Amino acid sequence: MDIYVTDTILKACDINTTGITTLINTCLLNIGWDNELTMHQLLRELGRDLVREESPNMPWKRSRVWHHKESFELLKDNKGKGYTIGLSLDTRMLDKTNLPGSFELETNSFSNMNSLMLLQLNYVQLQGHYENFPKRLRWLCMHGFSLKSIPLDIPMENLVSLDMSYSNIESFDMSYSDPQPRAKRKKQSVEPRIKQNRLLGSLKILDLSFCEQLHSVGGFFKLPVLERLVARNCISLIGVRESVEQCVKLVHIDLRYCYKLKKIPISIGNLKKVETLLLDGCNLGGSDMDSSDIATISQTSSSSSCCLNFLPNSLIILSLTTNNLSNKSFPVDLSCLSMLENLYLDNNPIDSMPRCVRTLPRLKLLSMDECDKISSIEYPPRTLRELSVSALPTFVDEIRPLLKTIKFCADMSPIRLSDWVLSLDPEIEVDGIVKIQALADVEKKLLRILGWANLKCIKKRSLRTRISLWQREGILEESPIQLYYEFGIFSTVYEGEEMPNWISCRSKGLSSSFTIPSSPNNLRGLNFCYCVETAPHDEFRMPVITITNSTKKQTWIYNHYIEKVQADGKCICLLSHWMFGPNEMKDSDGITIDIAQLHDDDEENHTLKVIECGCSFVYDVERNEEEEDVLRYYRSWNHIIGGDLSPFQLKSGKYILDYFSFGRLIPEVYDEYHHFIGNDVYKEARMMFKAFSQKKKPNQPMKSMNALIKDHNQSVSLELPTRPKNKYFISMIKGLQSCPLSYAFSASPIIYEDWIKEFWATAVQGFNGNVPYVAATIQGQAILVDEDIIRKTLHINDHKVAFKGKLKKEDAYHS
């Protein structure tokens, strides 16, 4: 049972619940999955023994009866007395072969149980009226209730929790469930009607889960203090009535997997205390809204997003899993959900992170698991603490991972990552983790900085590679020779028998040791290359490279992003550039480089035939600002050599540079590394990821603005946006060009090029009433631009010149 439900019921029984925390701290109670409170078996048996001692041979004199056979016999023989506070009976647990007679019970069996407050009657067949039911009930659980509606004569004035899961009720509406004919109801006295108005007046928790015949839920004005509404897996439910807004204390709504639920009541947006709304599997993306409903909703970008425009602004948790929601289903702006912390969009056909997610100012958890069409995630909110984008449970040819781009804000908070599966596309870029691009498309400046020359013949080749897919077998894909970047290491893999001729320090075998020679220049990095033989018709597993600086007692164990290659007996070469700095390597340091395979033992080690390996050093001969710009993005990453590798450090001080470590949740290292590290574990219990280092400042003023900053009053031409059909922006620029801009040209602003790019990459259009605006995100901060803001910022209003570029509302939808 949910810990909140337990606490609410016990408090209603005047039982002090402060001891629950103590029992949890001593591990006698445990909060498990889905907030379920469980008890240690020894504690449960101890409590039951204490209750048995109250009356060893007469269960009806005990305060609690939980044994199903004892409960059944007590009720069957009408022995219930005022001693009992709680009783549990589930007829499915009875051995019916040893119990003679009928299994039906009379409601009169409860007439003398005046103290009963906790009653569980699961799959019990009851006969008779319910007037004599205990009046002090606080918790009533009747799974498998056989009637089609709840009798009104059940005394429920003091009930705080009602659980009717798995029952046959067809409609829940206490104002219409009176079993008496309408003629008799009209003749009722005033006093019974007043009593009806108090029916369920204390109810805080209502659970109707798995009621397969239930088609509607209403009568909420009878539930003034309701806090939790649960109707999970009600597969026939088609509507929740608008009177739900009467439940002003409602905190939790669970309507998961109500497949036929056509719409959510609009009035739900009027609730001020709802913190959790679970709508998994409700097919909201495929539902049709009535035209009358749409007319009442303002600021809606399309009819398919209507259901998301009237959510309670008090929400903290929102789950929209498996709702057939595409990117068009989401509104432009969700900033009204200013309290939202957890958002679940799993298993929806979205192709990218919806832009409205960026407008959530307090979002901490974003889950998009099993969204098999998602290809990009750009600039999630900087407040995010956890990002989950794991792949589908099974990986087949028909369902291929498409995720290839993840962009983060520079000032993002450290987050926990899930075990996502990236696309097999040759172009992949995940800020701070891995960047892959075709070697032929790499800037010559970058290759020159790395000290890589004469690679033209390599660029034209291709190679079949396999990427490990988180404990699943990957797919061999043929692609052009690629450049990989991760952990501050550039690398490329290709077929060939010879290393580049500029690799100087060469040796045979699996290990190479040397001393860094002295140089008047600063060491920029180390190029390392190996060439190995492969077996015919077998996939070759990429070896692990271990570099040890014995002088500084530092060790880096690098497992390449590529798991295997198909070489068909040909030789494979790996060329890598390690961006070591003076803190990692300098003159006279002793260096050892080893090559080995995972799951390695002495016998297998001999099967790795290294033809040759070697290295060369790259120095800063002349510092060039243009070259620094080329490396600025790569050096701005946080988890690289020379940056923050603490999440990858073992207690022994060694570093394991493995792509899969970004998703780890435990300190234990994968078993396949046992040969390298023994029983060593990570220094930090779990991985917390941060894409960019705060020490690096990637933003630089636009070079094209230099002339403007020096001489403000010269004429300026405002550039049009690159996107087509941006009528609003074009209209805005034409209007600005028609106005005097003397203030703007004399203010001498500093403009950052990447900020402008980020603005246009995240820009969306919307309306505040009839006023158009542009919403975007820069460095994780929400930016809102409209005509009034532009006028005030540029001081256009002081000239009182009419703004000629007006936008028609319908034009904004074309962008």
Image: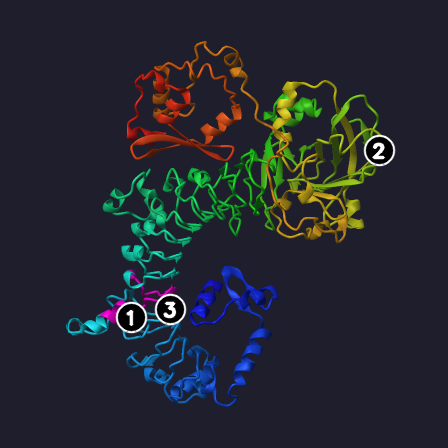
* Image vertical order of residue 423 relative to residue 811, above or below: below
Q: How many C-alpha atoms fall within 10 Å of the one at disc 1: few (<14), some, or many (≥20)?
A: some
Q: How many C-alpha atoms fall within 10 Å of the one at disc 2: few (<14), some, or many (≥20)?
A: few
Quadrant position of residue 148: bottom left
Q: Earlier in the sequence, mark 2 or mark 3?
A: 3
Q: Amino acid at mark 2?
A: Phe
Residue interval drawn in magenta: 194-220
| Residue 240 visible at all | no
Q: Say which residue label 1 marks.
A: 148
Whole-angstrom CA distance, mark 1 to mark 2, is 84 Å
Residue at image location 31% in from the left, 54% down from the top:
245
SS of the residue at dot 3? strand
Task: Depth check: give the residue in front, 441 or 766.
Answer: 766
Q: Earlier in the sequence, mark 1 or mark 3?
A: 1
Q: Residue 777, which numbered label?
A: none
Q: Nearer the viewer, mark 1 or mark 2?
A: 1
SS of the residue at dot 2? strand
Q: Say which residue label 2 marks.
A: 514
Q: Say which residue label 3 marks.
A: 162
Q: Main secondary structure of the magenta part?
A: loop
- Report whether 14 appears left or right of 703: left
Looking at the rendered structure, the number of numbered marks drawn on it comes to: 3
Quadrant position of residue 436: top right
Task: Depth check: give the residue in front, 393 or 627.
Answer: 627
Q: Amino acid at mark 3?
A: Leu
645 within the magenta span: no
Whole-angstrom CA distance, mark 1 to mark 3, is 16 Å
Point out residue 412 in the picture as x, y percentages from the top left corner: 55, 38
Q: Amino acid at mark 1?
A: Lys
- Report whether 442 appears left or right of 274: right
Q: Nearer the viewer, mark 1 or mark 3?
A: 3
